[in-house]
Image (tube, rainbow, N blue to C red):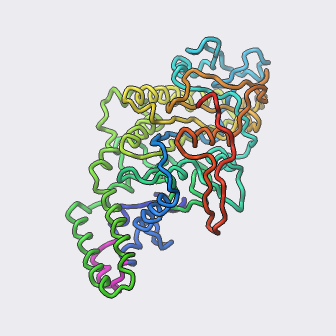
Amino acid sequence: MRPDRHPSVCPADLLAGVSHGILQQRLSRRSALRVGGLAGLGVSLPMVLAARSRAAAATGRAAEDINCILIWTLGGTSHHDTFDPKPLAPVNVRGEFGTIATATPGVHFTDIVPRMAAEQKRFALLRGWNPQNGSHGFADQWVMSGRRPNPAVHYPCFGSVVSYVKGFKTALPPFFQLGSNVSRVNGGGTAGILGLEHNPFEMLADPAAAKFDVRDITPPAGVGSERIERRQDVLAKIDALQRATDLQPAAYDALDSHVKAAFTMITSSATKEAFAIDAETPEVRDAYGRNRFGQSLLLARRLIEAGVRFVTVSDGGWDTHANNFKSLKDSRIPPVDQGLPQLLIDLEARGLLDSTLVLWLTDFGRTPMINSASGRDHWASAGFAIMAGAGVPGGHVLGETDAQGGSVVRDQYLSEDIAATVYTKLGIPTDLIVKSPDDRPVRLIEGRPIAEWL
């Protein structure tokens, strides 16, 4: 967990801090728990678990058990050069790529996404998205929450709302983010007013690396099962010294369950199995692509199978102001064109596609006019979104832009509408109201679901 980013759960550090040295200090249960990445804030993993438990109880709702994998391409993926080509436009608009037919009659993509074209029956495409924004940072917060950034109210992203409403399913946190390619400038990809306990558990390690290791799940070096048991015993002894004189024994009892959950998370065989990506056959790993993006999608599938409810797979390098065509063709598009269709194929083969919503979202579109650096700049009034699984009709193409791809001329939908669709698919009410830290009621979404995809 990077200390310069938002606070998150660090169970390995929790165990690392409960040592013999604590016994030589003032015997305080709170001191024993205030360790690891959250120590400076006075927040520990058990406190995080306790807060999540309270939040889940407060909603009083049993949401439908649909999970989600969100692919976030940071920077703004060009709609012209992928899924909304304009072959009849002037060359300074249509660009360098040709077009190819897709599996859906009459629908064409550019020729750099051949596998997405061949598998178009597996996903729905929105060509009518109007992002209403061309600013980085703003985009991460707006698109991933459905609410325009507001300095007075930090709206939570989808994954945080899922964490808040549904809570834990297994020992693993309900919300993961793979990679660091989400801008936090305006609180993008975080829990905002819901509290840090609903922030994503960030995993920054590369699952394609030869020695893939997840620091926040793996106990510290030299801390084996015997040492973990000894530290649990130390904590129990500290407990016993204070429990008899404490005025709030019920609070200790409640905290015990969350301490247990913290230990369970890093000692659970299911947790270890979820990250054992090398247990996949070479053929499966090859099918996803032996690169960070492809293996992140494979890991996302494994996390969903292990009980994680929402996984964001982030990928950077999409802000193509210069060398747009070379960048897309040589590096950015190939891993996605291979990995995303394979994820949908794999989910379907495992019987998980009906219960897993898959999204591809990005900051905004890019300019119709190609600039002098062979790039495209930010564009605030047209872009694309892709959705699959959870009953979304595969092969459906919705919306249309004008002859130069500059504005939506039919079936326009906004970011809040995408958000409302996500909420509806995940079984979360679109009229959900939560309390802000100052106890004000806040409605989380005000869009209209995309009826054609319900």
Query: Residue 378 is drawn in which quadrant?
Result: top right
Q: Is residue 350 left or right of residue 42?
A: left
Percent of width and height locating residue 282: 32, 29
Count of numbered circles on the image: 0
Task: Relative to 284, say whether 151 is above or below.
Answer: below
Residue 25 covered by magenta stretch: yes
Task: Relative to 90, say whether 313 is above or below.
Answer: below
Of 339 and 332, which appears nearest the observer? 339
At x 54%, y 38%, the residue is: 425
Magenta range is 18-29
Residue 373 covered by magenta stretch: no
Percent of width and height locating residue 315: 54, 40
At x 70%, y 53%, the residue is: 149
Percent of width and height locating residue 195: 55, 62
At x 43%, y 25%, the residue is: 345
Task: Relative to 56, say whether 318 is above or below.
Answer: above
Query: Residue 100 is drawn in which quadrant?
Result: top right
Percent of width and height locating residue 174: 44, 51
Q: Which quadrant would the C terminus be assigned to in this image?
A: top right
Task: Relative to 416, say whether 369 is above or below.
Answer: above
Q: Is residue 358 left or right of residue 453?
A: left
